[in-house]
Amino acid sequence: MTRWEIVFLSALLVPAAVVEAQVEDSPTLSIQGFGTFGVVHSDEDQADFVSNLFAPKGAGHSDDWSAHVDSRLGLQLTANLSPRLTSVVQAVSEQRYDGSYEPSIEWANVMFEVTPALSVRLGRMMQPSFMTSEYRKVGYAIPWIRPPEEVYRMVPVTNFDGIDVNYRSRFGDYTHTLRGSYGRKDAKVAGGGEVKSRDTMLLTNTLERGAATLFASYGRYRLTIEDLNPLFDAFQQFGPEGEAIADRYDVDDKRFEIINVGVRYDPGEWFVMGEWARSDSRTFIGDSRGWYVTGGYRLGDVTPYVTLARVRVDGETSHPGISMVGLPPPLAAQADGLNAALNGLLGNVAQQKSLSLGARWDFARNLALKAQYDHIDLDSGSPGTLVNTQPGFDPGGTVNLFSLALDFVY
Amino acid sequence: MPTRFTATGWGALLFCLMIGSAWAEVVVVVSVQNPVETLSRAELSDIYLGRLNRLPNGASVVPIDQREGTSTRGEFYKKYLGITPAQVKAHWSRLIFTGRGQPPRSVPGDDAVADVVAEAPNAIGYLDPGPGLVDDRLRVVTVE
C-alpha cells in the first residue's frame, strides 16, 4: 500500500512522472485543525485592547482578564480531488463583530495546478498583505501571541473572495514566488456598519534562499463605509468648504493603497524578522506608517523573543472644519456638531510605539505555551490601537499588557 | 598484565564507540536506480520543507519522512536541517493552513523507509543504518 502511495505522490507532483506504474486516481481527504486559548490582562480599564479591530470586547474595560482577545479554534478540510485539483475549506470560531463565536468560513477555495509552477485559486482566501498574513490566526505557526498590531492592523480584514494566481520559479538555491489576487470583501464592524472593499488587487513577491526570506507586497482597494455617508453628505450642504472636506475625508468608493516589505532570517537557533508598511488614501483613515522588528533565540524548547514596533500617521489628525463665522445660530450649531464628529474620526487614528518581551515554550508535541508582556506608549492625544474608549480614558498614556496563550495544532 | 588489559579495554571501548557512533549516524538514502549521489544541505532542506520537488538534473523527488516523535526523525532534522521537530511542525502549519502543501508521507521505522525508497526510483529517505539495512537496493547520498 505504501508503495502505491509513493507512486501516487509522484504522480501528484509531476504529471509526466518517471514512475511507469498506473495508479487509480484515489482522492484523499485530510482534516486538520489549530487553535489558541489565551488570556490578556490590561492595566488600562477605560479602554479595550483587541487583536481584531472588528471585535466588540477586549481586555481592560470589558474584562480585567479577557479570553476573547486571542482565543480561537480552526478546522480545515483539505481535499486532493485529483492530482492537480485541491480544495481547502477552513472554518474559524473566534469573537465576531456581534460578540458571538459563530464559526465563519475563512478559506473556501479550489486550486488548480496548471503546471507544477503555476497555480490558480478560485474562492475565498486570506489576503497576503503582510509576511505572515495568511497564517496570522494560527498561533502555533507564528512567533508571537499575535502579530504586531502596529503593522497588521493596517489591513484588519483577513480574507477576500476572488481569484489568485501563483507562480513559483527556482533558480539556483533561490525560490521566487509571484502572486496576484483580485477580489472583494465586506466586513461587518462591531456596533453595526460594514466596510466594503471592491476591486481588491494584491501583488506579492517572495524570494527565499535557505534561511532568508524577502517579501514585498502592494495592495489596492476601493473602500466604502456607507454608515459614514450621512455625515459627509451633511458636510456637502455647507457649500464648497464642506464639499472639500467631504471629498478629502469621506470613504465612499475611495482608493486605499498599501505597500509592505518584510525580511526574515531564521537559521534555526535564532531568528530575526521585520516588516515595514505604509498605507495611503484620501480618507479620514490617515496615512499610516508602521514597522516592527522581532528577534528570538531558541534555547532548547524555550524561545525568548523581543519585539519593537511603531505606528504613526502622516498628516493632520485634526481639522478646523467648517468656518462658523457668519452662520446663523442653527446652522452654526450643526456645523459645530459635524466638526466635532470629523475630529473624532481624525483623532482616533492609532499612533503608538511598543516593546514586547515574550517566550514560547514547546513543552509537548503540537503544543506551545507563550507568555508575553507588552508595554505600549501611546502618542500624545492618540488612543493607539485601543478601542471602546470610555469618557474617563486619557489618550496618550502608557498601557501594559500581560498575555498567556496555549497554541495547538492537530 | 594490568597495563595490557587496560590497553585492550580501551581499544574495545573505542571500537564500540566507533560502531556506536556509526550506527547513530542517520544517513540519507535513495534507490540505486536513482542517479543522485550528492546533494547540498540546502537542497536536502528544501526537499524536506516542501520547497523543492525536482533535483538539479530535472528529475522529480519525493521525500519520505519517519513518524513524529521517533529519535531517528529528530536526529535527521537536527543534523541535516538544523531545526527541532517543533520548528518542523510550525513550518508545516504555515503551509497546511494556507492550503499550500501537506507534509511528506511518513512511514514507521528504518525498515519501512528502506523498502519504500528501494521500490520508488524518485523517492528519498533517511534512516539509521542498522545491520543489513543499506543493502544493494539502496545508495547512501553524500550531503555536503
Image (cartoon, coloured by chain):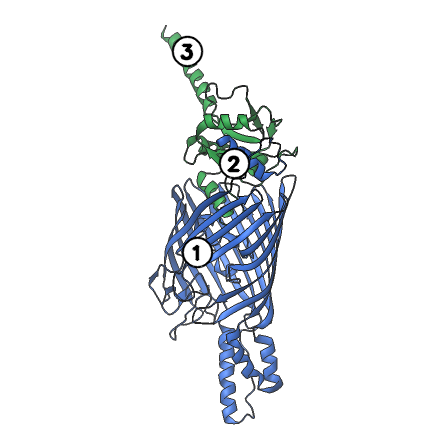
- In the picture, the disc for residue B81 is 2
Q: Amino acid at mark 2?
A: Leu
Which residue is disc 1 drawn over? Answer: A92
Q: Residues within 10 Å of mark 1 (few under 14, many from 20)?
A: many
Chain assigned blue: A
**Alpha carbon distance from label 2 to label 3:** 39 Å
User: Which of labels 2 and 3 is toward the front?
Assistant: 2
Parent chain of label 2: B
Q: Secondary structure at mark 2?
A: helix
Instruction: From the top left corner, tell me how far across and down residue A407 is, in percent.
Output: 40, 49
User: Which of labels 1 and 2 is toward the front?
Assistant: 1
Look at the picture and state if A224 lies above or below B85. Answer: below
Quadrant housing residue B44: top right
Name of the residue lying farthest toward the left: A64
Residue at 52 percent across and 44 percent down: it is: A80
Name of the residue lying farthest toward the top: B1
Chain assigned green: B
- In the picture, the disc for residue A106 is none
Q: Residues within 10 Å of mark 2 (few under 14, many from 20)?
A: many
Which residue is disc 3 drawn over? Answer: B7
| Among the two numbered marks 2 and 3 on one chain, the one whose residue lies closer to the N terminus | 3
Q: Secondary structure at mark 1?
A: strand
Q: Is residue A83 visible?
A: yes
Q: Amino acid at mark 1?
A: Val
